Image (cartoon, grey):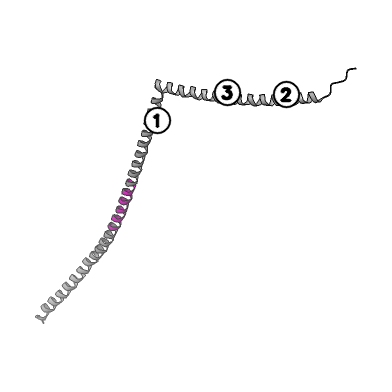
Amino acid sequence: MRKLVPVVATALGLMLATAGVAAAQDAKSAPAAKAATDTKAADAKLARDAKIAAAKLEVREKYAQAKAVLAEKAKQASDAATSAYEKAKAEYDKAQTPEAKADRSAKLKAAKLATMEKLAKAKVVIAEKAQKVAEAVRGEYDKLKAAQPAPAKK
């Protein structure tokens, strides 16, 4: 029995050691499993955050592109307005020269003379028609006067 006790003790020790190792492994694997789960959750969160960041970046890029397009259109409108202003200013400056003023004055005088000429012609036509009407009325008057018997004198 004396020989048996050390063998049993050794076997028991091995069993305990094996159980201890298994328990230790279980104890180690539980945090490892939890750590693996935590790592998966962290990876999923990182992936979700990366997708959100990418979407935000895409929106910012589209916003910047839209602003650039609007800025370009505003620049084109400004250039067109500047061009129109410069053209109008050049025409105004040209109209303010003494030659242009004299030309406008001459055109105005010519228009006034043409109007006065038309008015005078209209007056002549009216006067001629009035004279013809007056002559016709005078003729009627003379006929009526001639046809009327002379009043008897008393």
Choose the circle earlier in sequence order: 1 or 2: 1
Q: What residue type is labelled 1?
A: Ala
Q: What residue is rendered at 61% in x and 26% in y?
A: 125
**Residue 130: quarter of image:** top right
Q: Tell me the tag on residue 138.
A: 2
- The CA distance from mark 3 to mark 2 is 26 Å
Give 50 or 70, whichever is nearer the viewer: 70
SS for callout 3:
helix
According to the picture, the residue beneath numbered tag 3 turns out to be: 120
Mainly helix, strand or loop, the magenta region?
helix
Q: Nearer the viewer, mark 1 or mark 3?
A: 3
Q: Which amino acid does label 3 sit on?
A: Ala
SS for callout 2:
helix
Q: Is residue 133 inside the magenta stretch?
A: no
Q: What residue is rendered at 25% in x and 61% in y?
A: 39
Give 99 or 116, whichever is nearer the viewer: 116
Q: In screen coordinates, is 137 left or right of 14?
A: right
SS for callout 1:
helix
Extreme-bottom residue of the structure: 1
Pinpoint residue 1: horizontal percent, then vertical percent.
11, 82
Pinpoint residue 9: horizontal percent, then vertical percent.
13, 76
Pinpoint residue 114: horizontal percent, then vertical percent.
52, 25
